Amino acid sequence: MTANGFEARRDRLLAVMTGLAGAALLALILLRGALRDPGLNSHGALADAFLHGRLWIETCPEIDCALFQGRTYVIFPPLPAVLAMPFVAVFGFPGFKGFVILGLALSALSLLVWRAILRGLGTAPSDTLWLLAALAFASPLYQVTLRADGVWFYAQAVGFLMVSLSLWAAICRASLPLAGLFIGLAFLCRQMAIFYPLFLLFLCLPRERPLMSGFTGLAKPAILAAIPVAAALAVYFTYNIARFGSPTETGYAFINNPDQTTFIWRRISETGLFSRDYLLFNTLYLFLQGFHFEFGGPQLTALTGFDKAGTALLVTSPWVLLAFYAKVDRVFLAGAAVIATIACITLFYHSNGAEQIATQRYALDWLPILIVLMARPHSRAGDGQGFGTGRPAAFAALPLLVTWGVTANLAVLAVLSVYRV
């Protein structure tokens, strides 16, 4: 058998393994949506409030609600609740018990958008399939879909779709105004999206023109793109004023979680939302912390728990390491600056995403940029045989890295399900 024949057989085996593991992970989402979605998502309560002409909710169905002047508020941006309004209008609250299925639909739409983005970048069909599998089952997108019955995870699924659409608008439509519209909507889900316009601007700059002349040519589209972003900021500031009397007060100062004893609550109440005290914890969990099962009993043979603070991105999504081979140019530098800004802010944040079996979900705020940088062609036009012309040899490891991420996620979920940890 030739070397090429062996490699093809190896990749087919990995594809079968990934397909079976992915199918099992998808089944888990469907089962959770059918059996374990209680319909008590705080965005559902907020959607019900909007339908009744209120900004406050009657009771807090989860944690992390604000109590201000005798009223209870959902502290998070409002767009995810707006998207849930038609379903809550039909089924009521908490009558609507389909947030996991809604999250699955949003993630499926995101994958369709990413298929278009990767095609627009000239990625080969086989590599496109591997990257879509990575996104679906070996990235934080999987766990926010699985847990979309929770307010935090559902909001992240909506935000990821909006960010993806902004990149689609820039890459596939070369439309900076349309990209600005979607990033404004993304901001109304996840505030960190406000840093994306820099990257979108550089994505839309003509590659063949010098930097300053490129900026001059994009002056009008940039102004048009700024309008929806400014409008989103105005909506959010007005929303905050109406609730808490200040444009920059999001409600975190008034969080009311009675009887909470978690380390997250102790951090908020004793240290604050941001502190350098959180840096080591967040950094290790983002880059180095592996899966950690806890054992008890006299002989340490009884599985008693699992570290749900998360697992490092490089452990559960090792395919992101291929971004090391990204083409370095002005687009790369702009993307790296946005990634560094978002990641550095979250490294000082009191939470790294709460309960999670895989990497912290906050990585979804900047992971789309990393994927674009990784998949961009290395020359002006891709050759249709990989990640653009001059595809590094290291990308031959993509199938193996994705298969590891998918099967590792399934293995951990299987163990936790069997042992009910």
Image (cartoon, grey):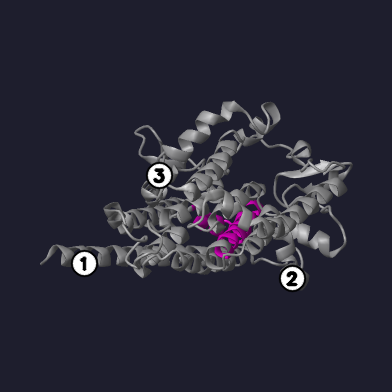
Farthest residue, direction left: 1
Q: Position of residue 135 (x, y in %)?
A: 46, 59
Residue 49 disc label: none
Q: Is 324 colored magenta in this rendering?
A: no
Category of crowding for the residue at label 2, using alpha-carbon neighbours closer than 10 angstroms: few (below 14), some (14–19), many (at least 20): some
Amino acid at pointer 1 = Arg
Residue 150 horizontal/vertical position (percent): 63, 54
Q: Is residue 110 visible?
A: yes
- x and y percentages locating residue 185 in the rendered image: 69, 58
Which numbered disc, 2 or 3, marks the residue that appears first in the sequence? 2
Q: Is residue 155 left or right of residue 107?
A: right
Q: Which three-letter amino acid code belongs to the residue tagged 3?
A: Leu
250 lies above or below 151? above
- The local secondary structure at tag 1 comes to helix
Between the residue at mark 3 and the residue at mark 1, the CA separation in whole angstroms equals 26 Å
Q: Which of the two marks, 2 or 3, is nearer to us in this view?
A: 3
Q: Secondary structure at mark 2?
A: helix
Q: Residue at x 56, y 51 (%)?
A: 199
Residue 299 location (% of width, % of height): 34, 33
Judge from the rendering whether residue 272 lies leftward or rightward of residue 249; answer left or right. left
Residue labelled with disc 2:
86
Kindly report the distance in space between the C-alpha atoms of the residues bearing marks 2 and 3.
39 Å
In this rendering, is residue 274 above or below 115? above
Q: Quadrant of the N terminus?
A: bottom left
Magenta-drawn segment: 140-169
Of residues 183 and 274, the one nearer the viewer is 183
Which residue is denoted by mark 3 in the rendering?
A: 314
Q: How many marks overall?
A: 3
Asked whether the residues under the numbered discs 3 and 1 touch, taking CB atoms below 8 Å apart as contact, a structural biologist would say no
- Can you identify the residue that label 1 sits on? 9
